[in-house]
Image (tube, rainbow, N blue to C red):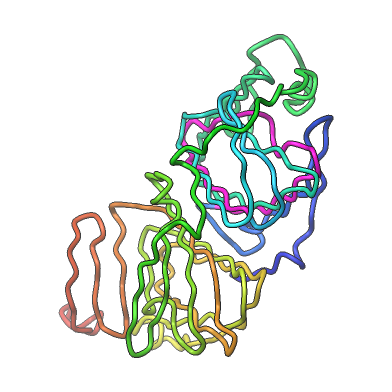
Amino acid sequence: MIAHWDEVPRELLEEGPLGGHWTDLGTAAGSVTVGVNRVEILPGKRSTPVHSEGEEEEISYVLGGSGLSYQEGETYEVGPGDCLVHLASEHTHTLVAGEEGLDVLAFGMRAYAEMGYLPRAGVMRHGRATIDLSPDDRHPWEREAAAGELGLPPPSPRPARIVNVADVAADERRGATVAVDQRHLARAAGSERTGLNHHTVPAGMLNVPPHCHAAEEEIFVVLEGTGSLELTPSPRQAAYGVDPSEHEVRAGSVVARPAGTGIAHTFRAGPDGLTLLAYGTRDPNDICYYPRSRKISWRGVGLIARIEHVDYWEDED
């Protein structure tokens, strides 16, 4: 449920012009249908082979350093606070670190039958299998390295699918217990199936009302400050002895909230405030429940209603 990037094993992946330290934060935090990796790209190296995903939408957020986003033969400068959206089956891409390296969070979906295309390596990926497009038994990273340098052109003006947090308007929410400056980064960059929001929360306040999802999974990464993750069980869970709980978080904490737990979550900022990223899917079949107000939101039809709690067996006798 909670991990910290300083406590998750890093793996060095390096082959020719490709190289970086990878940290699987999503798996460490217990995510199920989505994931996030921290990729610390070595100076002058690329993050991955040039590729596109057939079904998965990819979102990257730059934590630090500088470099280039390579997309379909063009390059674009990227740096801290940038959000990049790569839609499924569009724009083969990779990242190239500058002299100081490039530190990136890579968020993505976990499709069981995902098909990825690596044009320079000459392969297709289908799940865990690699489909050769040419007679070559080398690993895709070896093939990418053997394909030579990319021949990076001078940077072009950035497309709309790259935005910086400072340039996205804040959606300010203020209430008695909830206060947040929320910036919809991925939406501004054109995402369709997933989202990435940037939350700045004042000291002592909640970032959102406590809630839980039926179909959407969420991952949170704390960027700055301290605070707590507050969990509230449903009335039925409480009746079976599940108690509310609080868990401390700090910069580098990663929280996964899989769908269908029935346990509502929110974050409360500590005395120095809290800044975090919230990543999740957009499922039209999702139902969101708010236990404090007893509201249910049917996301796909845009309907919200308040309900009264009744005993599960009340009408069964």
Residue at 69 percent of width and 56 percent of height: 64
> Residue 130 lies in what quarter of the image?
top right
Quadrant that contains the N terminus: bottom right
Quick check: 100 left or right of 162? right
Residue segment shown in magenta: 35-62
Image vertical order of residue 311 relative to residue 87, above or below: below
Task: Pinpoint residue 155: horizontal percent, then vertical percent.
Answer: 61, 33
Q: Please name whichever residue, 264 or 102, is drawn nearer the observer in this view of the structure.
A: 102
Q: Name the outermost residue toward the top.
A: 135
Does the magenta portion include 163?
A: no
Seen at 63% across and 13% down, the residue is 133
In x, y percent, where is residue 167?
Answer: 46, 56
Q: Which of 71 and 123 is in front in this view?
A: 71
- Please state if 13 lies on the left or on the right of 184 as rendered: right
What residue is shown at x 34% (from left), y 81% (from top)?
174
Along the line of sight, the residue nearer the viewer: 253 or 223: 223
The foreground one among 282 and 277 is 277
Dividing the image into 4 quarters, which one contains the C terminus? bottom left
Q: Which residue is drawn at 53% across and 83% down?
A: 269
Q: How many marks?
A: 0
Instruction: Say which quarter of the image contains residue 298.
Output: bottom left
Answer whether residue 46 is magenta in the image: yes
What percent of the width, then of the height, locates residue 240?
42, 86
Residue 197: percent from the left, percent from the top? 45, 61
Q: In which quarter of the image is residue 5?
A: bottom right
Q: Is residue 301 left or right of residue 124?
A: left
